[in-house]
Image (cartoon, rainbow, N blue to C red):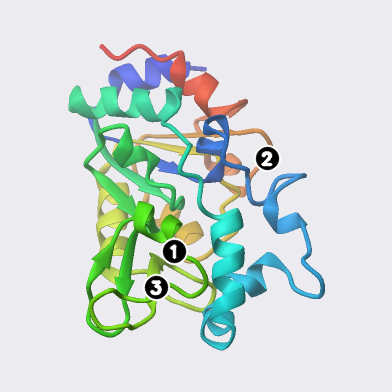
Amino acid sequence: MASLQQLVDRAKRIVFFGGAGVSTASGIPDFRGAEGLFRQKYGELTPEMMLSASFFYLHPDKFFEFYRAHMLHPEAKPNAAHRKLYELERAKKLRGIVTQNIDGLHRAAGNRLVYEIHGSVHENVCMDCGREYDLIWMLETTGVPRCEQCGGIVKPNVVLYGEAPDKYTCMGACREISNCDLLIVAGTSLAVEPAASFLDYFHGRDLVTINLEEIPADDRATLRIRGDVAEVMGELEVR
């Protein structure tokens, strides 16, 4: 069986499809792991409830209290996986990153070919006038953040439960997956739609899965790797 290094060396068009496990080495907790955020309860509410669109509109004060406490990690920095993907993009081997993460670490590492299908915490938009604000501004606010221009509520540009992701971002992600010859699926359980269905667009030569636990995509994989994404990706040589 070919190694990951061998598959990367022979590939012409690589796409990396990542989830929360890509950012754990940066200090951001995995949502669905044994100690993950989504295994916790907050009174009678689950994190999925508190991160839903309906909860945002009905209880914006409680939504933002939870959001600031658990979804924002301004101290996080790109890890070895993010940095290696930047090297691969510079070498023109990586043609796209499809990420379920909202932490913005791929862009912080320098990557530009990024499809953030669930949005980014670094983008916040007034629901009334459309004025945009960054993460630092959001962190400096308290309660329900209000636009400095018109007083409207400023909503994070992240996809909440019950909302559909941006169709153009999804179209671009699926286009890249359909055109690649090596797809690396890493740090994701593929438990959330529509992202889980994106693999249906892959018809390339090699599929690699990198995860601590088994995932459905393992059945289709050319190579299955059990391990930490940052450690595995960090060992690659870009040549």
Crowding at dot 3, Cα within 10 Å, few <14 / some 14-19 / many 20+, comes out as many
At 51% from the left and 85% from the top, the residue drawn is 57
Q: Earlier in the sequence, mark 2 or mark 1?
A: 1
Q: Which mark is residue 211?
A: none
Residue type at tag 3: Lys
Residue 23 appears at what percent x and percent y?
Answer: 51, 37
Indicate the quadrant containing the C terminus: top left, top right, bottom left or bottom right.
top left
Q: Are marks 2 and 1 in contact (CB under 8 Å)?
A: no
At 44% from the left and 22% from the top, the residue drawn is 80
From the viewer's side, name the closer residue of 8 and 192: 192
Residue type at tag 1: Thr
Crowding at dot 1, Cα within 10 Å, few <14 / some 14-19 / many 20+, comes out as few
Residue 33 appears at what percent x and percent y?
Answer: 71, 45
Q: Are marks 3 and 1 in contact (CB under 8 Å)?
A: no
Q: Answer left or right for 70 relative to 117.
A: right
Residue matched to label 2: 214
Q: Earlier in the sequence, mark 3 or mark 1?
A: 1
Residue matched to label 3: 155
CA gap between label 3 and label 2 equals 35 Å
At 45% from the left and 43% from the top, the residue drawn is 74
Report if residue 121 is visible in the image: yes
SS at circle 2 = loop
CA gap between label 2 and label 1 equals 41 Å
CA gap between label 3 and label 1 equals 12 Å
SS at circle 1 = loop
Residue matched to label 1: 141
SS at circle 3 = strand
The residue mark sitting in front, 2 or 1, is 1
Residue type at tag 2: Glu
- The quadrant holding residue 4 is top left
